[in-house]
Amino acid sequence: MKIALFSDIHANLPALEAFFADVEIHKPDAIYFLGDLVGYNIWPNEVIDEIRKRGIPTITGNYDFGIGRHSDDCGCAYKTDEDKAMGKISISYTNEIVKDKKLCLSPVIELFNGGIISYSLSESPNFKQISAMLQGAFKNMDTGARPILHSDQGRQYQMKQY
């Protein structure tokens, strides 16, 4: 089985296109992205669209995490004050340009083996998303299972429907 792993595209659409051209030649059985889709370059939305179009499983990189949290810190290990200032400009630009491209993930993870029992995606965290995720989890559990569910987000506990 051939597996293609790639990472650190950082919104560089020409680099991503070159990677996909190579994928067409080598035809791997699976493709996984290991983090940092966005940041530093001018094509974050186009890069996100290409990954979504192909349904490539993606791990959140430190820059992606900063954007997901709408933070002014990308988690980069900048050493100088000048680099830190430039980093803030970069993440601010990326936050502004990707604001309509974010998806919220709501997973149920089996802590024993790390497997995903259920998940749902939504453009904003909401009760419909949480309900879909829970319904999927209950559907995938063995009869008689007695799950313990925990969330560190707290938002769902504040919803009237919950």
Image (cartoon, rainbow, N blue to C red):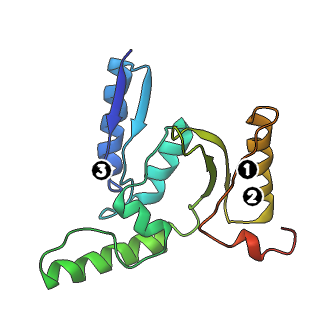
**x and y percentages locating residue 145 in the rendered image:** 76, 38
Which element carries disc 3, helix, strand or loop? loop
Image spot of residue 70 (x, y percent): 48, 74
Instruction: Identify the residue position indicated by label 1 in the image.
Output: 133
Say which residue appears at 61% left-offset and 69% top-offset: 153
Check contact, mark 2 vs mark 1: CB within 8 A. yes
**Residue at point 80%, 74% (across, down):** 159
Residue position marked by numbered label 3 in the rendering: 8
Q: How far separated are the C-alphas under marks 3 and 1?
A: 29 Å
Alpha carbon distance from label 3 to label 2? 31 Å
Residue 110 location (% of width, % of height): 59, 43
Q: Nearer the viewer, residue 162 or 46?
A: 162
The reply to whether dot 3 and dot 1 touch (C-beta < 8 Å) is: no
Q: Residue at x 75, y 66 (%)?
A: 126
Q: Amino acid at mark 3?
A: Asp
The residue lying at 18 percent from left, 73 percent from top is 78
Q: Is residue 42 visible?
A: no
Q: Which residue is tagged 2? A: 130
Mark toward the start of the polypeptide (3 vs 2): 3
Label 1: how many Cα within 10 Å (few below 14, some 14–19, many 20+): many
